Image: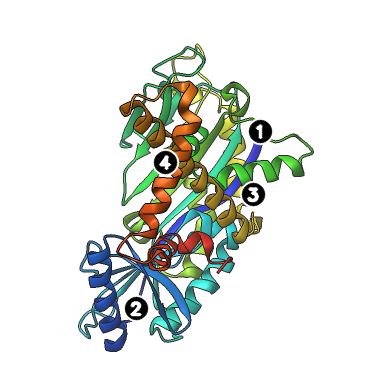
Amino acid sequence: MDVLYSGFDGLDLALKFNIGGDFAAYLEAKQKEAAAARYDVPGEWEGETFTVASTGGQGGYAFRLDTGLTDEVWFLKRPNARDPWGVRVSAKSAALLAHGLDGWQRKMEATALAFGAEPIPRTTSIARIDLAVDILAPDFELDDDAFVMHSRSNRKAIKEIIQTNGRSGRLTSVTIGKMPGRQVILYDKREEVLTKRKVEWPLVWNARRRQLGQPDLDFSDADSSRVWRVEVRAGKHHLKKHWGVTGWGDLHTSLPHMLETTRDVVRYCAPSPDSNRSRWPIHELWSVAQTELLDRLALRPPCIDPVTIRHETALDKIEVLTSQCTGILIGIAALKGVEASHFQTFLAETTTRVSNNVQYHPQPLQDRLARAADRYASLTQDQR
């Protein structure tokens, strides 16, 4: 079983500061612009670029900002001296892949300073961490009865109807526990990546394969490219009540002990004839994942360049839009009764019609292209 990735997959935290009135007024105007446009609009403040959504977030957050595909989402409250914890930040998995934990922290703190934070210690409260290990295990089959856990743990199995080489009803995910406590999840990461088109993960996995001197995975062949993820999530309740984790120092100190405890509380085993489940041996996949989390987690550097992630994501988006365009054209041709032998003529006529529509549209093409570019700014910022 080859480990293709291990490290942080997500991190949420609160910051103790309020944005200024000028910044809030600027965001109010941008928020109205986003509501009118019906998509997130670009903004800039103190050299930091982002997009502004038309809505905020739960918990009294008035504004929601996205600083990019390989960065984070910011939730900001309106200035309120009686509520000093005015900011929440959620790191994207691609941000942690592109910068590593320490690199992302430095980058995020620089953005916080631009937004109005003061460089004062003990102004960070960590609300959630997600840790993951991805293992290439094509022959592994998930069995929810193979989990051995504390009697108070909650278990949820998700059975999705997926056609895979003629088999249906394959178990793809089992979750132990619930947030904002602690969760342990074992699931088919390949299935999720392909379904949600998360292009960064195949890049990371294949980069690791090349380091091992092995060929890239063929994702069209499920039987040779099945990647399973073991994920450990710790929410605010678990971090603070059980481990006293608030800031970065607490996290680094307590993390190894947290993982050791999780290993003891939840185990995925290889079933045996022994009627005492506590004596079942640990499954190889689970053993590999626990070793990675405990021994090598802190050593993981950034996995992939952010420019590469954005470039590959843009190419994937082009492929999706091209496919949609093709389907629309075929639908129009069918409605017009076009025969297959005349499809090329239909395409030429349609191209002329589209060109005329663009030429005589009441809004200039330059303005329409600019708005489209704004919508995809996070993917094209290195080209502009």
Does label 2 or label 1 sit earlier along the sequence?
A: 2
Tell me the kind of residue under disc 4: Thr
Numbered badge on residue 350: 4
Residue that numbered label 1 is attached to: 217
Task: Tell me how far mark 1 sits from mark 4, CA to CA.
Answer: 39 Å
Of circles 3 and 1, the one toward us is 1
Query: Between residues 204 and 286, which one lies in front from this camera angle?
Result: 204
| Residue 53 in the image: above or below residue 329 | below
Tell me the kind of residue under disc 2: Lys
Residue that numbered label 3 is attached to: 295
Contact between labelled residues 4 and 1, with CB atoms less than 8 Å apart:
no
Q: Residues within 10 Å of mark 1 (few under 14, many from 20)?
A: some
Numbered badge on residue 16: 2
Which type of secondary structure does the marked residue at label 2 adopt? Answer: loop
* Outermost residue, right side: 213
Does label 1 or label 4 sit earlier along the sequence?
A: 1
Tell me the kind of residue under disc 1: Leu
Contact between labelled residues 4 and 3, with CB atoms less than 8 Å apart:
no
Please name the residue shown 40% across and 35% down the image: 329
Task: Tell me how far mark 2 sits from mark 3, CA to CA.
Answer: 33 Å
Q: Is residue 228 left or right of residue 125?
A: right
Colour scheme of this structure image? rainbow
Does label 2 or label 3 sit earlier along the sequence?
A: 2
Which type of secondary structure does the marked residue at label 1 adopt? Answer: loop
Q: Is residue 151 left or right of residue 188?
A: left
Contact between labelled residues 3 and 2, with CB atoms less than 8 Å apart:
no
- How many circles with numbers are drawn on the protein? 4
